C-alpha cells in the first residue's frame, strides 16, 4: 500500500508540471489573439477615420470650387489642409506621416489621403524598422451639377365654363363618381404646383415609412383619397390655400372601392434620386389626373360631350385609358436619362344620324335627283324582272288579277306582296379613335446632339419628342372589340343607303285595295305574325356603304429650350413665365381630306353607272368635305381648336398638349460620387 502511494504522488507532481506548461502556452496564445484583434480593430478605426476626413475634404473643396471656380489645385490643397487640421476635424497627420493629393475633373474634386500608422502596438515591445503601414482613402465629390426636369401638360391653361363641364363628367366618370367643381375650382387646380420633396416626405409620414425612404413611397400601395388629401395638406401648410377646397372636394367624392395605386407608376423618378433632385415643383393637376387614370384600371367610361356641330342630335362618347399619363422626372442631364410620356386613350364615338334632321335633309337633297332611277331599280328588285318593260307589264297584270278579290269566300288567302323600302342613315355611325400618346426625353447618349449647354448667360436644353400614331376607324364597330387591347377592332362598312324589300300579306283585297297588312318576320316569308313593319325581315338587295381606316403619323423631332423660356428648376412656370411651355408642331391634325371608301353593293352596284357615279360624288361632297359630317365629328375630338378637347383633358395626344423644361446649370448642392 505504501508503494502504491509513492507512485501516485510522483505521478501527481508530473501532471502539475504539464498543467503549468499548458497554462503558459495558453496565455501566450491569448496574448497573440488579443494583439491581432486589437491591432485589426485599431487599423479599421484608423481607416474609417481617414475615409471620413477624405469625404469631408472632398465635399468642402468641391463646394468651394463651385462658388469660386478660379481656385487652382494648389489653393484647393491648402483648403484641404485647413479642413484636415487637428483643430477642425481631429486629423492627427502631419507632413512627416501623411500626404494630401487633390485632382479636378470638370466640377468633380477628388481628394486622396495617405497616412502612416504603427502596424502593431504590441510590436513596440520589440522595436523594428518595419513597424508602419500606409493607409489610404479616396473620395470624389461634385457640386455645381446641372439638374433638369421635363414636363408635359394639358393645353387647358385656361378653363372656361364649358370645359369645366367636360372635366367633371370625364374625370368623374373614370372614377365612377360625380364631380361638381366650378370653372374657378378647375382653374385653381390646374395652376397649382407642389414641392415634390415636401410632398414625398408627407406621403412617407402618412405611410409610416422611414424619413427619406422615397423608394418606399413610390412602391407602396396608397389610396387615391390619401394621395389627394396629403397634397391638400402640403398646400395648406405651405400657405397655398387657393385650391385646397377643390382638392378636398375631389377626395371626398372618390368611391371607397377605388383600387389602390403605386405613385411610382406615375412619377418616374431616377433611381436613387437624392433630396437635391427632389427639391422642385411639379404640376399637381397632371399628377392627380394621372392618378385618376391609373385608379380607373383601364375601364371604359361613357361621357356626354357637347359636340358643337349643327344638327347633331345624339352623340355619345366612351373613353378608355390604355396607359395613364406619367408625371415628369427630375435628373442630371449629364448622367441620367430623363423621360416622360403621355397617356394612351381609346375612344368610341356613336352618332345617331337617323334623328339628325339637317343631315338627313342634306343627304336627301343629294339623292333627290336620282330618286327616279332608284325607283326603277327598286321596281326591278321587287318584281325580279329580267325581261324589261314587256315582262314588267305582264307581271303587273298577273298581280292585279290575283288581288282583285281575296280574303273572302272565293279566295280566302291573299297572295304575298313584295314591298320595296329605301333607308338612309338608319343605324348609328361609329368612329373609333386611338390616340397613341407621345414621349419627351433627354439622354447622355443623344447622337450628335448636346443635351445641355451652360455657358455664361447662354442656357439650352435639347430634348427628343416622339409621338405615336393617331388612328381613326369609321363604320360599324362592336363595343367589346373597340376597347380590347388584344388586337385592333374589326370594322364593318356603314350603310348610307340601303334598298331592298319586305314581304307582306294583306287580310283582304277588294279590286286591288288591300288592308291590314301582316309582315313576314323570317327569310322564307312564311311567318306573318306582326303588324309592325319595322319588325319585318329585310331582304337587302343593295346600297351604298362607307368605311375608313386612316392614320395620322406621329413625329420624331428635336426640341430646343433656350433662355428666356428655360426657367430655373423650381421657378413658377405657368403663371410668371408662360413661355417655358411650347406646343409641338406635328403637322396637319385635321381629318379633312380623309380617304373614306364609299362603295356600292348588290343591285345598286350592277345598276346604272351614271346613277352610281352621281350618288357617290354627291355623298363625297356632303360627308368628306373639310366641314362635312365625318371630318367634323372626328375633328371635334382631335383638333384642339374645336372646343371639345377630350384628348387634351386626358393628356392623350402630345400633338394637342404642350411640353416644357427647366434647367439649373449650377445646383448649389454637393454630393459624394464614390
Image (cartoon, helix red, strand yellow):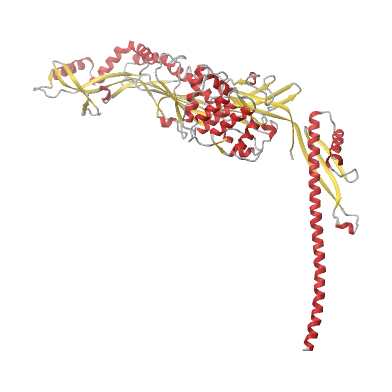
Q: How many marks?
A: 0
The quadrant the N terminus occupies is bottom right
Name which residue lies at 87% across and 34% down. Answer: 74
- Residue 454 horizontal/vertical position (percent): 73, 25
Left or right for 23, reference 316? right
The one of 345 and 578 positioned closer to us in this rendering = 578
Regarding residue 85, the answer to whether it shows in the image is no
Q: Is residue 486 left or right of residue 670?
A: left
**Residue sitting at 42 percent across and 31 percent down?**
481
Q: Is residue 7 left or right of residue 663?
A: right
Image coordinates for residue 564, horizontal then vertical, percent: 69, 19
Looking at the image, residue 57 lies above or below residue 573: below
- The quadrant of the rendering that contains the C terminus is top right
Q: Position of residue 287 (x, y in %)?
A: 58, 29
Of residue 610 and residue 78, the one placed in the foreground of this image is 78
The residue under the point 29% across, 23% down is 541
Q: Is residue 519 visible?
A: yes
Q: Relative to residue 496, is residue 259 drawn left or right?
A: right
Residue 527, x across and y down, in percent: 21, 29
Which of the 4 quarters of the picture holds residue 567?
A: top right
Amino acid at each position: 500500500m505504501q508503494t502504491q502511494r509513492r507512485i501516485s504522488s510522483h505521478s501527481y507532481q508530473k501532471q502539475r508540471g504539464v498543467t503549468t506548461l499548458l497554462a503558459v502556452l495558453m496565455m501566450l496564445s491569448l496574448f497573440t489573439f488579443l494583439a491581432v484583434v486589437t491591432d485589426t480593430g485599431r487599423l479599421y478605426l484608423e481607416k474609417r477615420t481617414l475615409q471620413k476626413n477624405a469625404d469631408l475634404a472632398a465635399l468642402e473643396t468641391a463646394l468651394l470650387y463651385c462658388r469660386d471656380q478660379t481656385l487652382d489645385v494648389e489653393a484647393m490643397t491648402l483648403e484641404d489642409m485647413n479642413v484636415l487640421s487637428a483643430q477642425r476635424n481631429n486629423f492627427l497627420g502631419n507632413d512627416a506621416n501623411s500626404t494630401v493629393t487633390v485632382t479636378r475633373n470638370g466640377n468633380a474634386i477628388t481628394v486622396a489621403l495617405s497616412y502612416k500608422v504603427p502596424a502593431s502596438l504590441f510590436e513596440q515591445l520589440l522595436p523594428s524598422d518595419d513597424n508602419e503601414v500606409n493607409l489610404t482613402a479616396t473620395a470624389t465629390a461634385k457640386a455645381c451639377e446641372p439638374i433638369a426636369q421635363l414636363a408635359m401638360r394639358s393645353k387647358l391653361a385656361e378653363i372656361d365654363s364649358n370645359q369645366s363641364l367636360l372635366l367633371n363628367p370625364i374625370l368623374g366618370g373614370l372614377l365612377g363618381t360625380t364631380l361638381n367643381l366650378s370653372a374657378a375650382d378647375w382653374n385653381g387646380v390646374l395652376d397649382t404646383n407642389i414641392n415634390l420633396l415636401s410632398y414625398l416626405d408627407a406621403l412617407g409620414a402618412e405611410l409610416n415609412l422611414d424619413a427619406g425612404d422615397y423608394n418606399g413611397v413610390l412602391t407602396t400601395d396608397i389610396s387615391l383619397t390619401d394621395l389627394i388629401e396629403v397634397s391638400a395638406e402640403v398646400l395648406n401648410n405651405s400657405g397655398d390655400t387657393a385650391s385646397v377646397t377643390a382638392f378636398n372636394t375631389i377626395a371626398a367624392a372618390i368611391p371607397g372601392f377605388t383600387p389602390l395605386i403605386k405613385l411610382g407608376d406615375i412619377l418616374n423618378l431616377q433611381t436613387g434620386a437624392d433630396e437635391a433632385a427632389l427639391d422642385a415643383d411639379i404640376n399637381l393637376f397632371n399628377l392627380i389626373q394621372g392618378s385618376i387614370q391609373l385608379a380607373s384600371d383601364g375601364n371604359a367610361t361613357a361621357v356626354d360631350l357637347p359636340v358643337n356641330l349643327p344638327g347633331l342630335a345624339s352623340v355619345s362618347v366612351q373613353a378608355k385609358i390604355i396607359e395613364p399619363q406619367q408625371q415628369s422626372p427630375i435628373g442630371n442631364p449629364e448622367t441620367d436619362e430623363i423621360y416622360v410620356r403621355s397617356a394612351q386613350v381609346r375612344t368610341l364615338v356613336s352618332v345617331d344620324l337617323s334623328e339628325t334632321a339637317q343631315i338627313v335633309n342634306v343627304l336627301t337633297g343629294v339623292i333627290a335627283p336620282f330618286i327616279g332611277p332608284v325607283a326603277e331599280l327598286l321596281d326591278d328588285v321587287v318584281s325580279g324582272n329580267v325581261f324589261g318593260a314587256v315582262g314588267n307589264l305582264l307581271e303587273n297584270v298577273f298581280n292585279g288579277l290575283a288581288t282583285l278579290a281575296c280574303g273572302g269566300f272565293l279566295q280566302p288567302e291573299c297572295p304575298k306582296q313584295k314591298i320595296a323600302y329605301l333607308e338612309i342613315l338608319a343605324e348609328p355611325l361609329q368612329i373609333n379613335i386611338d390616340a397613341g400618346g407621345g414621349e419627351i426625353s433627354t439622354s447622355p447618349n443623344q447622337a450628335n446632339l448636346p443635351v445641355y449647354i451652360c455657358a455664361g448667360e447662354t442656357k439650352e436644353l435639347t430634348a427628343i419628342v416622339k409621338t405615336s400614331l393617331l388612328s381613326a376607324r369609321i363604320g360599324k364597330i362592336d363595343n367589346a372589340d373597340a376597347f380590347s387591347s388584344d388586337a385592333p377592332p374589326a370594322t364593318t362598312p356603314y350603310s348610307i343607303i340601303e334598298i331592298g324589300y319586305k314581304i307582306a300579306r294583306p287580310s283582304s283585297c277588294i279590286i286591288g285595295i288591300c288592308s291590314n297588312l301582316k309582315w313576314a318576320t323570317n327569310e322564307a316569308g312564311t311567318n306573318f305574325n306582326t303588324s309592325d313593319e319595322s319588325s319585318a325581315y329585310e331582304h337587302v338587295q343593295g346600297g351604298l356603304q362607307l368605311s375608313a381606316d386612316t392614320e395620322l403619323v406621329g413625329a420624331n423631332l428635336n426640341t430646343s429650350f433656350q433662355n428666356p423660356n428655360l426657367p430655373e428648376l423650381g421657378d413658377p412656370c405657368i403663371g410668371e413665365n408662360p413661355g417655358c411651355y411650347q406646343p409641338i408642331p406635328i403637322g396637319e391634325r385635321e381629318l379633312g381630306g380623309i380617304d373614306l371608301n364609299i362603295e356600292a353593293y348588290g343591285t345598286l352596284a350592277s345598276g346604272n353607272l351614271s346613277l352610281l357615279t352621281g350618288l357617290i360624288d354627291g355623298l363625297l361632297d356632303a360627308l368628306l368635305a373639310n366641314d362635312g359630317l365625318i371630318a367634323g365629328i372626328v375633328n371635334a375630338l382631335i383638333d384642339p381648336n374645336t372646343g371639345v378637347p377630350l384628348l387634351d383633358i386626358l393628356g392623350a395626344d402630345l400633338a394637342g398638349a404642350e411640353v416644357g423644361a427647366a434647367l439649373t446649370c449650377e445646383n448649389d448642392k454637393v454630393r459624394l460620387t464614390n
